[in-house]
Image (cartoon, grey):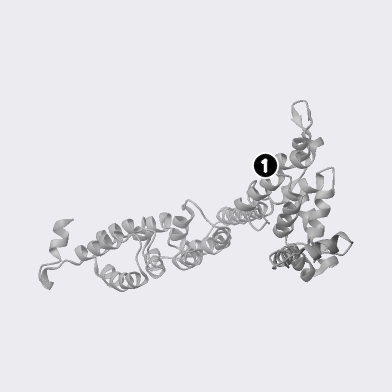
Amino acid sequence: MTSEFRDLERPQALRRKDVVLMATVTSFEALSHPTRSELRQFAELFMPIFSASSDEARRQAVAALAQSPNVPAAVAFFLGSQPIAVAAPFLMTSTCLSDEALVTIARCQGTEHARAIVSRAALSPTVIDALVGLRPDISRQARSATAEPYPGSAPVEMSRAEVDTSIDTDKRAREEDLRRRIKLLAGHVERVEGDRLGLRSLSEVQEALLVRFARNREATFLVTALSDILTTSRWLAERVLLDLSGRQLATVLKSLGMQSADATYILTRLYGHLAEATGGVSEAESLWQSLDEEECNARVEAWRRADRYTYGADQAASSLFSGADTDTTQAEAFVEERPVRSSATLRRSASGFRIR
């Protein structure tokens, strides 16, 4: 590598563009956190040098940049659009290609690029849908390319058996495409266990606060935390906690995705009868296992809608801070300077007068 950098010091006529390309890539890899200006300079310098270099140097540069997480978007799209012999490692491993770039490359470059994209370790649902939709077009292009006669060749009559074979092939391709689409739709409908995407979930801080308030049996703080997490009025949170069976609170915790151990601990601390064990399993654990997460989500959303209709967004929001306003007013009244008491005021108070 040192000798390659030394070549940069030679006169312009002797400078080899392949060496310049590899030196540019190496210097860019040395930047752990490149600035916006450095990314722009690299994009402006890289593309002309890459276009003027040999195929071997291009493959080496693409293989090196495929491991870099900082490649600019324009350069990444440029490399992904190269011939498949050069772009394959970049399409299969680079994390700098966005979903839009992958879909565009698959649509514009053809079958080989699409196959390289399919070989990536992870694909988003958007890219999968686009690739599935591209399959009929790709198959149609391949059949049309195969059906084109060579220049100077005479047309050949296809026999009935060959026609039937091609029809069966098309039918199988359509059935396979439909089967893949159904599997993809089923994967979207049936949520994978542990997938909380798009659902109301607890953060680590919120979960820790709920466990702490339940451990100390601080019902007021627990009501405030629940109403804040659910973005509802305090009345709904109080109604949930007043259910002595614990089922409503378990339903809320299940819909929020709380861990089983933390949820059963909260239930046993707030409702003592749920700590009783039958056959080595506590009542809280049995209650938790009997709840279905989808049903809990639907029930909690119905409670939230009813709460909005009953109290309204403004009243729900004001109820969250009413306790804080009351505490502030009491604190201000407490720190007011109290009047100095004399013996006369004490005698009057003993006679039934109220002390200020």
When the figure is inspected, residue 123 is found, relative to residue 214, above or below; the finding is: below
Residue at the disc numbered 1: 262
| 42 vs 263, nearest the viewer | 263
Which quadrant: the N terminus? bottom left
Question: Measured along the vertical axis of the image, is residue 238 above or below residue 108?
Answer: above
Identify the amino acid type marked 1: Asp
Give residue 132's position: percent from left, percent from top. Answer: 57, 59
Q: Residue furthest front?
A: 343
Residue 272 x, y percent position in the rendering: 79, 37
Quarter of the figure with the C terminus: bottom right
Which is more toward the observer, 337 or 244?
337
Residue at figure coordinates x 60%, y 54% from the top left = 164
User: How many callouts does the rendering have?
Assistant: 1
In the rendered structure, the answer to whether residue 146 lies left or right of residue 219 reads: left
Task: Mark yes or no: residue 55 visible.
Answer: no
Q: Position of residue 353 (x, y in %)?
A: 87, 64
Mark 1 residue element: helix
* Left or right: 257 as drawn, with respect to 106: right
Residue located farthest toward the right when viewing the structure as drawn: 352
Q: Is residue 73 shown to the viewer in this render?
A: yes
The quarter holding residue 2 reads bottom left
Q: How busy is the neighbourhood of tag 1: few (under 14 within 10 Å), some, or many (20 plus)?
A: some
Image coords of residue 96 (percent x, y): 42, 62
Residue sitting nearer the eye, 214 or 124: 214
The structure residue drawn at horizontal position 50% and vertical position 53%, both measured from the top left corner, is 122
Residue 148 lies left or right of residue 25; in this view the side is right
Residue most extreme to the top? 279
